[in-house]
Image (cartoon, rainbow, N blue to C red):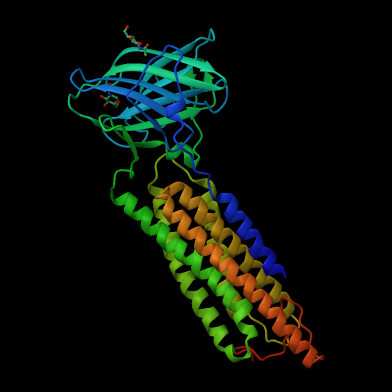
Amino acid sequence: MASSLTLVTILLLTVSLISPSRSATCQSQTFTSNKLYTFCNDLPSLNSYLHWAYDSAKSTLSVAFIAAPAKPNGWISWAINPTSTGMVGSQALIAFKDSKGAMTVKTYNISSYGPVTESKVWYEVRNSSAEFSDGVMRLFATVVLPEKGKSTVNHVWQVGPSVTAGIPDKHEFQPANLNSKGSLDLLKGQSTVSSGGGDSRTNKKNIHGILNVVSWGIMFPIGIIIARYVRSFPSADPAWFYLHIFCQVSSYAIGVAGWGTGLKLGSQSKGVRYTVHRNIGIALFSLATLQIFALFLRPKKDHKLRFYWNIYHHGIGYTILVLGILNVFKGLDILNPEPKWREAYIILIAVLGGISLLLEAITWIIVLRRKSGKSTKSYDGINNGHGRQEPLAA
Ligand SMILES: *[C@@H]1O[C@H](CO)[C@@H](O)[C@H](O)[C@H]1NC(C)=O
Ligand SMILES: *[C@@H]1O[C@H](CO)[C@@H](O)[C@H](O)[C@H]1NC(C)=O
């Protein structure tokens, strides 16, 4: 029953990964000073909200940015990036408590990853202020944009845990911290997820994602299902074995290609490290390579080491299954595609899980029937105790 437990675990894991959807809450937010803004948006990450009013004739933009700092003595920031998307190049307003404990707002021209220094920015700040209550900070500012008629801007927002000697310390590099960027249509009132520039890097990330989802996330699990369940049908012998080998070897090939694109993306990514995703990826590659060795080191069926080989092969197989699916979700967090992709994958995995549970039941029925017919052979639930000859074993 080990594998049905594994599959149930995966199902539960999958359900817990479905992120709850949020309804527009910014419309119910009000301000103590009765300030009114034309538009508001629930920003897609870091539980943040942006309210704004834009006067295109004067090119003035009034904003209220609301977010909880990562820790009570931390900071929140909202920025416009006039030259690019993301953090580098952004012209930031950062709100935090100064040394006397009063809320302050300062401006930063962020030209690289690393410590920030207060400086002039691309826009002129008419006035700014900030408040802190109930764990939430509110940053207010009226700025004059230097380019008249530019009604769509790239914006970035962030929250940080602490401030040292008047300098905001670096924020975390979790997916939520890295996806907190978008494009803001000041006139239409829409904030859209920026595609990261729509450049070749995004394409590479998509290719990396597709290769790895197909390999680790879909084909490996199917290959395991074939090995575990299809073999119980006498008519599927020895076809299941070749199908299993075919599935796992081709998913290994695709997986190695996907792994290579991941290494390349990692080496090109300046300042941003997706440590967990990367380490799981390396572990997957190593374990899968071990499985390929397992094919060549496979002792004959009656060999006394065959028992240990089975433990080794199945143990690594199930580890790859769990880590592979986990890393698909880690990758989805980073890539942050439209929700339908995550949903589609969840449905696919749930269907595979459902099929496995069904086949698990059928397998047990077949095995028990066979057992009552031929009482000399026993079935141990994991190993090939059903006494049929496997190809390539001899
Ligand atoms: C911000 O810093 C960059 C790099 O140091 C510089 O090229 C740019 O002119 C600065 N922007 C402003 C508005 O000062
Ligand atoms: C900026 O100043 C204007 C005029 O004095 C005032 O109406 C507005 O509320 C101020 N905005 C902020 C963010 O303090």
Q: Is residue 151 visible?
A: yes
Front in this rendered view, residue 24 or 122: 24
38 w.r.t. 240: above or below: above
323 w.r.t. 34: above or below: below
Q: Residue at x 42, y 34 (%)?
A: 43
Front in this rendered view, residue 9 or 111: 9
Residue sitting farthest toward the top: 100
Q: Residue at x 59, y 91 (%)?
A: 235
Residue 305, percent from left and from top: 73, 80
Instruction: Locate the N terminus and report the quarter of the image it occupies.
Output: bottom right
Q: For ligand 2, give the image quadrant.
A: top left
Q: Residue at x 27, y 29 (%)?
A: 186
Instruction: Locate the C terminus and report the quarter of the image it occupies.
Output: bottom right
Q: Is residue 277 left or right of residue 60?
A: right
Q: Is residue 384 visible?
A: no
Residue 139, percent from left and from top: 42, 19
Residue 208, percent from left and from top: 40, 58
Quarter of the rendering containing residue 30: top left
120 w.r.t. 283: above or below: above
Q: Is residue 87 left or right of residue 150?
A: right
